[in-house]
Image (spheres, rainbow, N blue to C red):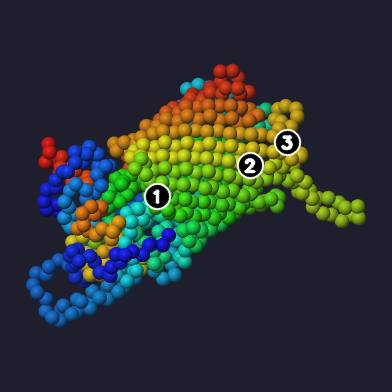
Amino acid sequence: MALSSSAWAQTAPPADVPVKPADTTPLVPAAATSTTAAAPAPVAPAPTTAAPAATAPSAAETAAATAAAAEDDSAVNEQLVADAAGKASGDEYKLDIYGFADFTYTHLLNKFYSGPPYNSFAVGNLNVYLASDLGSKFHSLAEVRFTYLPNGSTAFGPTGTTTRTDTTVGDYADIGRPVRWGGIVIERAWLEYAAHPLLNIRAGHWLTPYGIWNVDHGSPTIIGVQRPYIVGDQLLPQSQTGLELYGKHDFSAFELGYHLTLSNGRGPIDTYQDLNNNKAIGGRLFMHADTPAGSVTLGGSFYTGRYTDRVQQLVINPDGTGAFAFPITQDYHEVSYAADLKWEYAGALVQSEFILNQIRYNDPRPPLLGGTGFVPDTQRWGVYGLAGYRFDFLGTMPYAELEYYDSGPALLGKSADVIGGLNIRPTGRVVLKAQYIYAWFPGSNLPPDSHYNVLNFQAAWSF
Amino acid sequence: MITRRLFLTSGAALVSPLFIPAGVGEAATLEEMLAVVAAKDGGMDGFSLHQLKRAYLGDDVQGPHGKIIPLNREPKGPERVGFDRSVLDMSPDAVARYWIDRKIRGQSAAPKAIEPGSILQKVVARLPGAIGYVRAHEVTSDVKVLLIDGKKPGDAGYPILAEGPTRAQAENRLMVF
């Protein structure tokens, strides 16, 4: 939005604001101008004015000092101004490296039907960001999660027993002693061009712009220990690979913004290969207003796409030549809708999201797990609401959350949970969380009276 | 820095800083006021407080030279604390949380911080599109002062104060109690 011209245009400071003559202090960059930290970094005080000399310098000394100062001024000025503009001098651009991690202790208060009934410590996320302003309105961001997986991940076999992945190998750097290797997850990697506040173009792998917590994404920014179940269940895909356009306009009284997406959609290898020619589209419209009654954000999102899985087969033609065919093994069309509301006033926060996903299968339908017949068309939907209040004391926020989820004909069926917890932020970079979850499953296919009763404690930090 | 006692015009000032617009109900001096400055030839004349807030919260606010480049002062310094309270309505801790959360979301980073005000003004003077803030009595001839909601430092109701209402309120409390 361009600044409006005004009737009170001025070319000099207002008459009754006294003006000092320009300071001749040589420019010295403050430490913060070159920081790469996430938060406003502390600044090393730069000299304000030269200390008064004990004796008056001679004219020659003054001239020499002035010349030297001017030279310093010129040399440092470029760097300081470039720093302030957000880029290094010359053709070099800064790479900003930062990230977050979390450590969680889970204490089960009852034995749930799935999962080992043991209490555990775990480092869940270790995510590193690489960000850079590339100049000329280009910006880049990559986020990589380091994980202990796939070691220890399990899969059900046809007999109902699980097989655990073991990544233990001999370490050639340690006379072959066993070491368990982990993996990486590319959470996002994109290039963005900021053409105009109304049009930013993002290309690559990005988080789907819907709701509140899919974009908040990182454990230090999430209030609870985990995201709501319906967000984690990806009724809309968590991330997509393709193009995203977004922008917003400030109408003074409120802000109106949009996102439009075009991507491979969901698929078994959607991050680099679409197995159909039907690109997924999605979008989000949101409105934000700062009112005397607080800050309000209201949004609505949609997504539609087609999931296709195929196998590659070598086919021998009647004439003896060979060719590859790509028969479909699973294919469905899906539509998702989401709505979100966030209200903040002083330390108070209320937020809610509603998400719905509908799946219509095409032939061949996948068989039902453990039963006869085929998977029917599915509708899943869920809603959660969270309320909290952050006090100044240690940045403490008690919060409560209610959630309901209808997962359709899946094993879980209908479920609900209630969560109460504390989110303590003694510094901006460190978040300590403690929460209690009680979940129950009305109308599910689980054993009667199944419930999930657990305490979680988490430390999340950004670096 | 406060050169004379402030006076109350409303009992509400004792209740909550949230409801005290800076500059209302108090007679601040130029030393207490923060002037928003830009390059003389930058083509900018003024902002609304809303635009200023958006620029300092990382939004894309356009000026004659493209995106406005906001420059900050050192965290927890009296100018920064007052500016954040007056313009952003945020405490230092809330501001720290805000920028950390933004970066984790993959959004833009916090404005660069430059100290002292004299150096900040030199940078602003040489960087088209840059804006910064200094105490009004420290404004040099390098820069020009921008009007905020049509007001300049010294005008009644000028909204941006160093250390803002918090210090004023503390002094008021001392006087009253």
In this rendering, the answer to whether A197 lies above or below A454 is below
Q: Position of residue B93 (x, y in %)?
A: 31, 44
Q: Position of residue B76 (x, y in %)?
A: 26, 50
In this rendering, the answer to whether B127 lies above or below B156 is below
Residue nearer the viewer, A461 or A329: A329
Q: Amino acid at mark 2?
A: Val
At x 47%, y 43%, the residue is: A298
At x 25%, y 75%, the residue is: A70
Give the left or right position of residue A129, taking residue B11 as reference.
Answer: right
Q: Furthest-left residue in view?
A: A55
Q: Position of residue A339 (x, y in %)?
A: 52, 40
Numbered label tally: 3
Give the left or right position of residue A81, taking residue A49 as reference.
Answer: right
Q: Furthest-right residue in view?
A: A319
Judge the density around disc 3: few (<14), some (14-19), many (≥20) Cα neighbours within 10 Å.
some
| Residue linked to disc 2 | A335
Judge the density around disc 1: few (<14), some (14-19), many (≥20) Cα neighbours within 10 Å.
few
- Name the disc covering residue A253, or none: 1
Marks 2 and 3, the one that precedes in the sequence: 2
